[in-house]
Every structure is written in C-alpha cells, then in structure tokens.
Image (cartoon, rainbow, N blue to C red):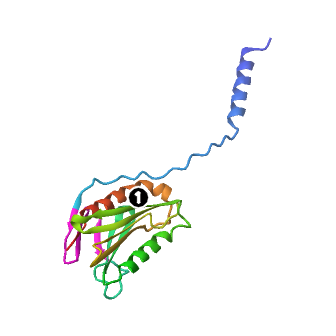
Amino acid sequence: MIKKGFIIFLILLAGIIYSCESHYTPKPRGYFRIDMPKKNYMRFDTSYPYSFEYPAYAYIEPSKHARKGENYWIDIQFRKFDATVHISYKKVENNLMTYLEDAHTLAVKHIPKADAIYDSIVLDRSRQMFGLIYQIEGSEVASPYQFLLTDSTTNFVRGALYFNVLPNNDSLEPVIRFIEQDIDHLINTFQWK
C-alpha cells in the first residue's frame, strides 16, 4: 500500500503543476465614468441682437472664427466635456435662402460618417422663432447636433456642437445627450431683440 504522505505529496505536486499554467482572460474595454453637473441656467442678455439661457457650468466667449464685421458670433464652452457650441449670427437682407442652404449644406456634409440625420422644426410664432434642429447620429460624426433659428425677416443664427477630441460618439453618447438638453433649453429660451 502506498503511504498517506506519498499521496499527499502527489496531490500537492499536481496542484503546483496545474497552477503554473498561464490562463489569460482579457478584460472588457471600459470607459471613464462621467459625472454630470446639476442643471442650472443663466441669462445671456447683452448688447447682442439676441438673448437666451445657457448652463451655469459653461462660459461664453467671442468666437475665434468670426471674420471682420461678424461681431455677434460666440462660443459656448463646456470645459468639463471639452466641447463647444459655436453660434454664428447673420443679418438677413434678402438673403435668407442663402443662409438656409448654407446651414443645410453644413449639416449634410456629415452624411459619409452619419448613420442617420434627424431634423425637427422649430416654430413659435409668438416669439417670431422659426428654424430647424439637426440631430446627426454616427460614431465618427464631427458635429452631432446643429440648429438654425430665424425670424425670417431680419435675423439668422446657426449653432453647432463640436467636441475638441477625436470623434468616438459611442463613448461620448451620454455627454452628447446631456449637452443636447442644454441646447434645447437655449432654443426654447431664445429671443430676438
């Protein structure tokens, strides 16, 4: 008969040999958790020909992309998310169709990267507010949310959301939806002067 000590030795030897084998299990890809700030809005009401409410966790600065004579262009910066809503303003002087076509062209430029483009109409006669919102979906879309607003006679505003990172909208999705709510609030509180 085999002694008990020899059996224990064989069991320990088998355990050591089995534990020496390499077993690799890849970890699933993860993303950083993004904490969203509490919604709180302030009024942008200056000498500009328009006013609106914007989030308290964002700040407004004059646009770096404005050319001479484009005094009312602004950028709404979302530092925490490394995102910007670029807002451009144009005076309408028998050229509304040109502005509308330009805004449409800038939205459909995303078609090669877009999975879908959804548009919705902005119509509020009491505020003389007419416009379109473009929600552009796709993992590599540079600007996932754009809008245009006009009173159809004097003023025209176009806005576009851009992130200052390489587009990966699958991982940016929660931030995109969060900022979309802020842009919708901006549109709902927008007024001409």
Residue beneath the point at 36% across and 59% down: 180
Residue beneath the point at 28% across and 79% down: 72
Residue, disc 1: 176
Horizontally, residue 110 falls left or right of residue 39, namely right
Which amino acid does the dot numbered 1 rest on? Ile
Residue beneath the point at 44% across and 72% down: 104
Q: Which residues are magenta?
A: 42-62
Task: Name, please, the residue furthest toward the top.
Answer: 1
- Report the front residue among 173 and 1: 173
The quadrant of the image that shows the N terminus is top right
The quarter of the displayed image where residue 45 is located: bottom left
Looking at the image, is 17 positioned above or below residue 101? Answer: above
- Residue 33 in the magenta stretch? The answer is no
Q: Give the image location of residue 84, x and y in percent.
A: 37, 68
The quadrant of the image that shows the C terminus is bottom left
Secondary element at image label 1: helix
Looking at the image, is 115 positioned above or below residue 102? Answer: above
- Report the front residue among 138 and 37: 138
Horizontally, residue 179 falls left or right of residue 170, namely left
Callout 1 environment at 10 Å: few (<14), some (14 to 19), or many (20+)? many
Q: Give the image location of residue 159, x and y in percent.
A: 36, 70
Looking at the image, is 43 positioned above or below residue 17? Answer: below
- Report the front residue among 191 and 77: 191
Q: Is residue 46 visible?
A: yes
Q: Give the image location of residue 128, x and y in percent.
A: 24, 69
Residue beneath the point at 23% across and 73% down: 50
Q: Is residue 57 visible?
A: no
